[in-house]
Amino acid sequence: MDLKGKTAIITGAGRGIGKAIALKLASFGANIVVNDIPSSDYAEATAEEIRALGVEAIVVKGDVRNSADVENLVKETLDKFQTIDILVNNAGVTRDTLMLRMSEEDWDLVLDINLKGAFNCTKAVAKPMMKQRSGAIINITSVVGIFGNAGQVNYSSSKAGLIGMTKSVARELASRNIRCNAVAPGFIQSSMTDTLTDDVKQQYFNRIPLAKFGTADDIAEYGKVYNRPGALY
Ligand code: NAP
């Protein structure tokens, strides 16, 4: 795939799946905007790794929950690269516990980052993409948004919501040649899953037919989705 001269914004790209996607898109020639939360310790190092591949990379920190931060992300991207060809809504968090113990704060936090954050970013890139009459938006959802999962009522709701958002955005923007797709990973080794207990990891493992956990690179390999017409669902 040739993405030479294209610009990709990846949210939460400092580490994990977002970083792997950023490196993969850079390997196809895209210039990269690394977004991560203001306190991220990883964003600059990730941008350095990307630059070593021979493309340009900038870091624009900002919280995807905050629409002013997201407006700034889009502004800085356009100031530097003039176009936005790809947005990957990857930033996400978990706050797992059984529903009866789940606080309102943990519900709001997960929905705000995982779902509202993707809405903020999608809305902000839609205008320049519509003007360009081209663009690709990729939402990183999860298998638990499809199947559900005990202990993840907030997270699975946010990811199911993201699937609905993907389908609706695809319908709204298709006539402007803007595609919106979702990728739904299963269990992927990252800082998000590193914190789970061995018992919980074993329970996930027992449900995986291939009998191995996925890696961030496995998800980045789904590069074909960046060129896929229409929504996956
Ligand atoms: P991760 O290693 O924790 O990476 C998440 C990234 O998002 C981190 O860089 C984090 O910053 C950043 N982030 C968190 N809140 C943010 C905010 N408000 N604004 C901007 N950036 C923010 O997790 P991951 O496993 O790579 O997850 C990436 C995506 O894949 C998430 O949407 C997740 O739900 C999804 N996913 C993961 C799995 C899995 O098994 N790992 C499975 C299915 C789907 P800090 O590093 O500073 O915390």
Image (cartoon, rainbow, N blue to C red):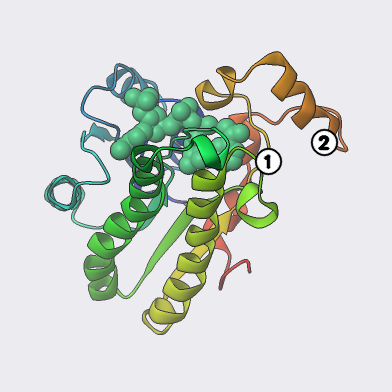
User: Residue 53 is drawn in which quadrant?
Assistant: top left
The residue that mark 2 highlights is: 208
Element type at marker 1? loop
- Residue under the point 50% across and 35% down: 101
Asked if the residues shown at circle 1 and circle 2 are in contact, with their CB atoms under 8 angstroms apart, the answer is yes
Residue 172 is situated, as x and y percent measured from the top left of the image, at 40, 80
Q: In the figure, is residue 39 to the left or right of 21? A: left
Q: Earlier in the sequence, mark 1 or mark 2?
A: 1
Label 1 near ligand 1 (CB < 8 Å):
yes
Most foreground residue, 81 or 59: 59
Q: Amino acid at mark 1?
A: Gly
Task: Name the residue beneath numbered marker 1.
Answer: 186
Label 1 Cα neighbours within 10 Å, binned few <14 / some 14-19 / many ≥20: some
Q: CA distance from mark 1 to mark 2?
A: 9 Å
Residue 24, x across and y down, in percent: 51, 37
Residue 147 image position (x, y, % from top left): 70, 53
